[in-house]
Amino acid sequence: MAKELTNLYQVGKSEGISEGMVKVAKKLLKKNMDIDDIVEVTELSREEIKRIKEQAQH
């Protein structure tokens, strides 16, 4: 049981960090920051940044 809770905590923590990086990427895109710089700062993939950019334009 304790192992399962630890795993759930780790998954939740990772998801929260990822969501935070997506928010940062959105803000940096609004400021017209270069995609390569956003990749470096957020550690998200180039493809993920492009997807976020495309979604923001719709």
Image: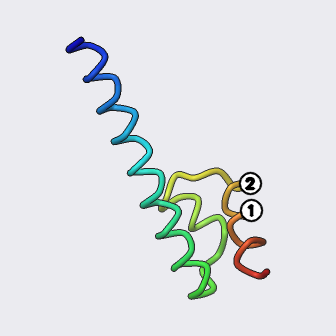
Instruction: Tell me the residue at 61%/79% (across/down).
Output: 29
From what the image shows, is residue 30 above or below residue 8? below
Q: Does residue 34 appear left or right of residue 6 in this picture?
A: right
Instruction: Tell me the residue at 39%/51% (across/down).
Output: 17
Mark 1 neighbour density, 10 Å: few (under 14) some (14–19) many (20 or more): few
Q: Residue 47, position in %: x, y?
A: 74, 54
Q: Nearer the viewer, residue 34 or 44?
A: 44
Residue under label 2, please give it: 47
Cα gap from disc 1 to disc 2, whole angstroms: 6 Å
Mark 2 neighbour density, 10 Å: few (under 14) some (14–19) many (20 or more): few
Look at the numbered discs 1 and 2 and tell me whether their residues touch, using CB distance below 8 Å.
yes
Type of amino acid under label 2:
Glu
From what the image shows, is residue 24 above or below residue 42? below
Residue under label 1, please give it: 51
Q: Residue 4, position in %: x, y?
A: 31, 17
Q: Does residue 34 appear left or right of residue 15 in this picture?
A: right
Q: Among all residues in the image, which is located at the extreme left?
A: 2
From what the image shows, is residue 14 above or below residue 47? above
